[in-house]
Image (tube, rainbow, N blue to C red):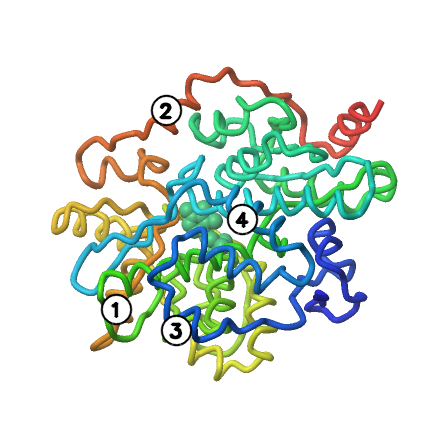
Amino acid sequence: MKYYSTNHNSANATLSDAIIKGLAPDKGLYMPEKINVLPERFFADIDKLSFQEIACRVAGAFFGEDIPQNELDRITIDTLNFDAPLIKVAENIYSLELFHGPTLAFKDFGARFMARMLAWSIHQSGDKEHVTVLVATSGDTGSAVANGFLGIDGVDVIVLYPKGKVSEIQEKQFTTLGRNIAALEVDGTFDDCQHLVKSAFMDVELNKKFKLTSANSINVARFLPQAFYYFHAYAQLRRSGVEGDVVVSVPSGNFGNITAGLFGKRMGLPIKRFIAANNRNDIFLQYIRTGVYAPRPSVATMANAMDVGDPSNFARVLALYDNDIARIRADIEAFAYDDAQIAECIARVYKATGYLLEPHGACGYMGLENGLRKNETGIFLETAHPAKFLDRVEPIIGSKVMIPDKLQKFMEGGKQSIEISSDFADFKAFLNDRKR
Ligand SMILES: *Cc1c(COP(=O)(O)O)cnc(C)c1O
């Protein structure tokens, strides 16, 4: 299968090229040239299949033309060494818990799958040279990518993060690993980190010397596997005997997660509608309302992984619907919530049901409260464990949150990081030194 660029100014790429490059040379996002529909038989029996069996089928439909099925199955099964259970929270409302992976956030799925696919792509290209993954992080992406890529042959990861601006637990998740993971503590802001990474990608000299790539949701191998759990959620709902139309609400920032769900629907998954739940960064909601896409600088909110002012996967949503806003509106409804509403929701749901939401999942939950119609069943994606947002959640509910062992374990590791200024020359010198 070939991958085209959403900007239509680059040659089509093979799967392994699209994975190694990340972004197309014309700065567009890669899209598969066709989306395979899964047979009715598959959906008729889906409630009898395990998460891994479902994921292997979905992965086969995406990547089966390019990777031998046994290899693809190995990558998929190796990725999914944790579950995504569906938990009933209220009447007609279910939480799809995506936080049972190594860093307790849904980005673990994409990061682990991409790491293995990148290793395969490198092997496929026959090139012995290492690939260097550069990630700028304000916290969570860095930890998922670092843990997902830990120990992967042929790949080095460099995480850049703003000194003093990530929580201790977040910092420990990517500074204690060692091996093929290096952490750079940048004297500056998250934007400075992002600027350093962008400058490195544009630097001709560095690109001659290194094979540089990124690991954010623009990469096809990171965002597409997120479709797996939409199918698994549907299977679990069927297993528990729930009938009627299914609506899925997705807390959205860069729109990688929801785009994977839209792909699932295109493959035949019977989801009636999606809800894009935003925080105060409501660029997508405004687009749905006015038809005008007007990116703007992000504002800081309690659901900070969704503080995005220009969602990078918006181009994919447009491509999927041929720029037809009427069709986009038919499939995606949008809502936005401010911090006060998020806090109120967390407190209210905890009191009424005992279920503890974190700020991103709370947006998804409210999306269902506002968007669900008669005879519809709603699933919201709970994208992180509440313990990752202790200082937000504890004051809201007025009690302590249990910290899972997995998270506690990171705290015991010793921090290894390299301090660096926000000056590109210093970053470049650091990279060059590694090649000597
Ligand atoms: C990244 C992230 C999101 C947003 O996902 P997108 O794919 O960028 O829309 C939501 N919640 C959490 C906890 C995240 O880390």
Mark 3 vs mark 1, CA separation in Å: 12 Å
Marker disc for residue 408: 2
Q: Residues within 10 Å of mark 2 (few under 14, many from 20)?
A: few
Q: Earlier in the sequence, mark 3 or mark 1?
A: 3
Q: Earlier in the sequence, mark 4 or mark 1?
A: 4
Mark 1 vs mark 2, CA separation in Å: 35 Å
CB-based contact (under 8 Å), mark 4 and mark 3: no
Q: Earlier in the sequence, mark 4 or mark 3?
A: 4
Q: Earlier in the sequence, mark 1 or mark 2?
A: 1
Quick one: SS at disc 2?
helix
Marker disc for residue 377: 1
Which residue lies under the disc numbered 4? Answer: 76
Q: Amino acid at mark 2?
A: Gln
Q: Nearer the viewer, mark 4 or mark 1?
A: 4
Quadrant housing the N terminus: bottom right
Quick one: SS at disc 1?
strand
Ligand 1 closer than 8 Å to the CB at disc 4? no
Measured as percent of width and height from the top left, residue 227 is found at: 48, 59
Q: Amino acid at mark 1?
A: Thr
Marker disc for residue 344: none
Q: Is residue 97 left or right of residue 27?
A: left
Q: Earlier in the sequence, mark 4 or mark 2?
A: 4
CB-based contact (under 8 Å), mark 4 and mark 2: no
Marker disc for residue 270: 3
Ligand 1 closer than 8 Å to the CB at disc 1? no
Q: Amino acid at mark 4?
A: Thr
